């Protein structure tokens, strides 16, 4: 298959697609292409996942409008199927790779999943196939890792035996399909012709700009946009600390600051989690030191955001002290374990650090989360007999809590709010020891 044949197959939707990795990114991408009439094979090595998808069951449990229906439709039409077996991929024209790309404890990218996926696909890749990396990767990874690995494992040369590009994602849990359809994308190709071909493919469901670029630009844009967000959140978090110490209210300050032109101060909060924001800044800075660039701001922002769950513990200790209670042996109701409101995604959850700290201090955390099977159930039952409640995630269910009922269930009326969930509720009722992040208690 040459470039023109591949272009024609993409244009008339006879190109056969494989989407490798069927997680938060890969599954909706596969379902969307199938919905557009392409023959799509979803590939995942997680035990039981392919079977679940083939049974038409959506494995993502958070609130994802339209995904379950689109998946079911793809499976029943026969255009979408899942497998764990790479041998089934020999007839595929396009490979889209969406496997996880975490960093380790030393903030170094761990590309085990990416390497394994590329090695497996290279062994079955037909002549003239297009490989697109959607996973988020550090700048230069396409040139320094993906390309040489594919060439070595397949014995084919890029732009002759296969085509290669990087098209990063802008999805977030809760808005997967919406963002895939409505957000613009940077379409990085190893050549301008490859970018053009990728644009023709993604045009099938992307209703926004598809901006052609080279791979390094695509890698930089993706990691920069998440590092930017992390730095902005860290700024808001530092202002929250300043406001608390100065006797102010960061939420009011933010509202008024944002009336000044070109100020868009972010929201402070109890921590930053998820698969992407806590690690993409590390992907961006990866390799900079070896290239002679010493970076300070981005690592500092990471450290500020990582410290917020510990700050929540400090607020808790202060609030408990005001009712004459120490944290030692206290039972603490922790509301919210996912990293994001109304999501089941617990990756890099700030609550995990909070809970670890509570244990270290001799407290007994009692976790509730309406979206996580392990922790769901009646919230009032969970908090019964606890010495305090802490809100770590702004789940909709928490905004509707009956605070009178909550107060009667708790042993003492201590409420620490890391997300300003109770602003329009009775949270600052004087009977409560209500402590809001960023506001002097
Ligand atoms: N989740 C998001 O909101 C989001 C947003 C933008 C970008 N991204 C990026 O997209 C990529 C994927 O993220 P995700 O959230 O979908 O991750 P995920 O963990 O939900 O999904 C990855 C899937 O890949 C599978 N996998 C791992 N190795 C494999 C292999 N060798 N062959 C086949 N399957 C394999 C895993 O079993 C898993 O199901 C990451 O690089 C991430 O940074 C994610």
Image (cartoon, rainbow, N blue to C red):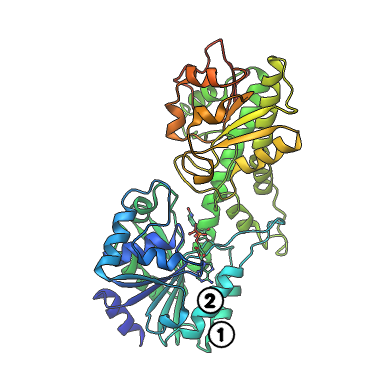
Residue that numbered label 1 is attached to: 153
Q: CA distance from mark 2 to mark 1?
A: 8 Å
Front position in the image: 333 or 347 = 333
- Specify the farthest residue to the top: 430
Name the residue: 58% across, 79% down: 149
Estimate the x, y position of residue 249 in percent, counting from the top left: 57, 20
Report the number of discs: 2
Left or right of residue 41: residue 309: right
Estimate the x, y position of residue 176 in percent, counting from the top left: 39, 52
Q: Is residue 425 above or below residue 262?
A: above
Q: Secondary structure at mark 2?
A: helix
Categorize mark 2 by other alpha carbons within 10 Å: few (<14), some (14-19), many (20+). many
Residue that numbered label 2 is attached to: 118
For label 2, being within 8 Å of ligand 1 is answered no
Name the residue: 41% across, 81% down: 88
Whether residue 76 can be seen here? yes
User: What numbered label is drawn on residue 16?
Assistant: none
Estimate the x, y position of residue 99 in percent, counting from the top left: 51, 65
Q: Is residue 84 above or below residue 345?
A: below
Whether residue 419 can be seen here? no
Mark 2 vs 1: CB contact within 8 A: yes
Front position in the image: 280 or 349 = 349
The C terminus - image quarter: top right
Estimate the x, y position of residue 123 in percent, counting from the top left: 51, 85
- Dot 2 or dot 1: first in sequence order is 2
Q: Secondary structure at mark 1?
A: helix
Categorize mark 1 by other alpha carbons within 10 Å: few (<14), some (14-19), many (20+). some
Name the residue: 36% across, 87% down: 2
């Amino acid at each position: 298959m040459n470039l023109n044949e591949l272009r024609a197959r993409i244009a008339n939707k006879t190109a056969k697609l494989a989407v490798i990795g069927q997680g938060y990114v890969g599954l909706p991408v596969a379902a969307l292409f199938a919905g557009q009439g392409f023959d799509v094979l979803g590939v995942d090595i997680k035990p039981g996942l392919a079977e679940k998808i083939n049974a038409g069951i959506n494995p993502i449990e958070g609130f994802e409008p339209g995904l379950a229906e689109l998946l079911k439709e793809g499976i029943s039409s026969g255009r979408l199927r899942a497998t764990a077996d790479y041998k089934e991929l020999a007839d595929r024209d396009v490979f889209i790779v969406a496997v996880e790309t975490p960093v380790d404890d030393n903030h170094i990218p761990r590309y085990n999943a990416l390497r394994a996926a590329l090695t497996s696909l290279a062994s079955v890749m037909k002549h003239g196939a297009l490989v697109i990396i959607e996973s988020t990767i550090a700048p230069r990874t396409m040139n320094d890792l993906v390309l040489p690995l594919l060439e070595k494992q397949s014995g084919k040369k890029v732009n002759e035996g296969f085509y290669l590009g990087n098209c990063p994602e802008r999805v977030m849990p809760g808005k997967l399909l919406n963002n895939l359809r409505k957000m613009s994308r940077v379409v990085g190709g190893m050549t301008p012709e490859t970018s053009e071909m990728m644009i023709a493919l993604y045009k099938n469901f992307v209703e926004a700009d598809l901006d052609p670029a080279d791979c390094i630009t695509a890698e930089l844009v993706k990691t920069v946009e998440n590092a930017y967000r992390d730095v902005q959140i860290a700024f808001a978090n530092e202002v929250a600390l300043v406001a608390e110490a100065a006797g102010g209210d960061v939420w009011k300050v933010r509202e008024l600051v944002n009336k000044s032109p070109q100020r868009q101060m972010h929201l402070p909060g109890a921590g930053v989690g998820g698969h992407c924001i806590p690690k993409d800044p590390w992907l961006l800075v990866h390799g900079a030191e070896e290239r002679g660039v010493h970076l300070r701001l981005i690592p500092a922002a990471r450290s500020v955001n990582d410290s917020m769950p510990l700050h929540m513990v400090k607020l808790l200790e202060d609030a408990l002290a005001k009712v004459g209670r120490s944290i030692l042996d206290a039972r603490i109701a922790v509301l919210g374990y996912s990293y994001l409101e109304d999501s089941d995604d617990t990756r890099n959850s700030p609550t995990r650090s909070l809970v670890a700290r509570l244990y270290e201090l001799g407290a007994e955390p009692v976790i509730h989360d309406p979206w996580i099977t392990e922790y769901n159930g009646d919230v009032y039952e969970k908090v019964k007999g606890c010495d305090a409640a802490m809100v770590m995630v702004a789940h909709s269910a928490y905004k509707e809590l009956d605070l009178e009922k909550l107060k009667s269930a708790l042993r003492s009326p201590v409420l620490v709010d890391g997300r300003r969930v109770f602003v329009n509720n009775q949270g600052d009722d004087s009977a409560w020891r209500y402590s809001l992040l960023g506001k002097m208690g």
